Image (cartoon, rainbow, N blue to C red):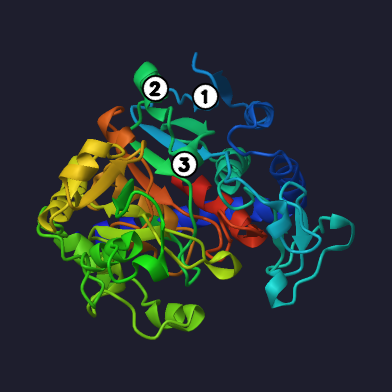
Amino acid sequence: MKRSLPLFALLLCSFFAQAQADKVRQLVQQRQQQLLQEYLQFVAIPNVMGDSINIHRNAAFIQQMMERRGIATQILTLPIKGASPLVVGQVKVPGATTTMGFYAHYDGQPVNPAQWAKGLSPFTPQLTTDRLDRGGSFVPGNAVPAVIPEKMRLYGRGSADDKAGVFAIIAAYELMKQSGQQPKANLTFIFEGEEEVGSIHLDDYFTQHKALLKADLWMICDGARHVTGRKQLVFGVRGDINAELKVYASARPLHSGNYGNWAPNAAMRLAQLLASMKDDKGMVTIPGFYDDVQPLSKAEKEAIAQIPDVVPTLQTELMMIHPDGDGRNFQELLNIPTLNINGFAAMNVGSMASNIIPAEATAALDLRLVKGNTVEGQFNKVKRYIESKGYTVLDHEPTAEERKKYPLIAKLTMNDGAYPAQKTPMDLPIAQQVIAAIQSTTTDAVIKIPTVGGSLPLYMFETILQSLPVSIGIVNYDNNQHAENENLQISFLLEGIVTMAAVMGVH
């Protein structure tokens, strides 16, 4: 009998948590029309970094949303030209010894309205009956129905990335309280306005407000649910380096007839150099590139084994017959560093092409880092490899003297904003509580992902605030974030509110 008591207690807690989640879900269903109407107002405010007036309008709108819900709010600023405000909200719980932090960002990627589908405008939110490329149509008058259909979408910049995260957090607190529940931990909310430009001032805010922003665990509400639609919790993100590699041949472009077979071609040199950095399986050949990768733990390997295989779906959707990776598991490949060519430029193509031997050629490189890599270490591995191919590697444009002295010259520079990877241990007790909280909102097993492929500067939470982050994505995976026709499946936002409310009960 005594042995069955712990199991009984566990089942009772699980049943209670599910009942609490159901109460919030019922309130969401009752108020879905009102919630969406408020959200449409939020998405209508332009949020591109550099548009200072509208960035501040977004911050003020967020502050008003929190104040209406009884959340103590302040807007932090920096004495730096162009720095976006950081909106902070706090809920203090008497006797609480734990603080749960919640983060989302309100800025969005730049837009080119001409690239959006006919009838759409990035900052004029538009409701549709379904995804437009699946036969969806505009909702007449953009009228919000009392009951929102499962497939209904909202088109607009920031609708998914990441105003959905901001709104879900704020609405979750309100509906949690209205359901009769109270948070057991103190809550801190921060909403950033510079995530899409690399969170360039977040470290300044963290350094100046360490005590204010300290939390036992940070919930990063950004990103999507799994491709299968199941809820997931992410424990790590890759780091990122953007670099530029440029090689030189002659002092000026040359006539391909007069100088062909004699003058070296900068585009060919760069193409050969880049091609030598990977084998025919897509694996990086640079010595030591993978050597300092932190091995996966037993828990991480078990989690990866339980992640649904999306490769067949992706291959069909992307029309890709033979992926890179030397036959490795897709998720395993997300846990090793990458080397990617983002762009290549020499001379013109198409109607502007001419019979020219390029004098110089440039490539934009993107390196993704995992736990164990350092920014300097990965960059220097690339630099040493280029040197091993006979190149003199500079960090500036070569002088005339250098051009005469060195037969092979490359310029390699790292762009500002590089940062390392971050990963939170999966067996952290408070993280296990978060998993249980999310699980209480769904009958499908929560997917646990050690590291996602994308990059965020989450290392700052760990190195400056001495806090660990985990990430919860709530939106549809096919949301076109960063691109034209960004959209949100509204049912995902409403369910995201339920998820965030459940997590707010963690202590």
* First in residue order: circle 2 vs circle 3: 2
User: Mark 1, mark 2: which one is toward the viewer?
Assistant: 1
| Res 260 visible | yes
For image coordinates 15% across by 51% down, the residue present is 381
- Name the residue tied to disc 3: 504
| Res 423 visible | no
Q: Residues within 10 Å of mark 2 (few under 14, many from 20)?
A: few
Residue 192 screen position, x and y as percent: 51, 33
Residue 499 screen position, x and y as percent: 51, 52
For the residue marked with disc 3, what is the amino acid?
Met
User: Distance from label 1 to label 2 (Cα)?
Assistant: 10 Å
On the rendered structure, is 52 left or right of 100? right
Please state the total of marks drawn on the protein image.
3
Q: Secondary structure at mark 3?
A: loop
Image quarter (top left, top right, bottom left or bottom right) of the C terminus: top left
On the rendered structure, is 154 left or right of 283? right
Instruction: Specify the label residue 204 is tagged with.
Output: 2
User: Mark 3, mark 1: which one is toward the viewer?
Assistant: 1
For the residue marked with disc 1, what is the amino acid?
Ala
Instruction: Specify the label residue 83 is tagged with.
Output: 1
**Outermost residue, right side:** 141
Whether the residues at callouts 1 and 2 have beta carbons within 8 Å, the answer is: yes
**Outermost residue, front side:** 258
For the residue marked with disc 2, what is the amino acid?
Asp
**Outermost residue, top side:** 79
On the rendered structure, is 461 left or right of 287? right
User: Distance from label 2 to label 3 (Cα)?
Assistant: 27 Å
Residue 34 screen position, x and y as percent: 76, 47
Residue 242 screen position, x and y as percent: 35, 47
For image coordinates 22% across by 49% down, the residue present is 409
Q: Residues within 10 Å of mark 1 (few under 14, many from 20)?
A: some
Q: Secondary structure at mark 1?
A: loop
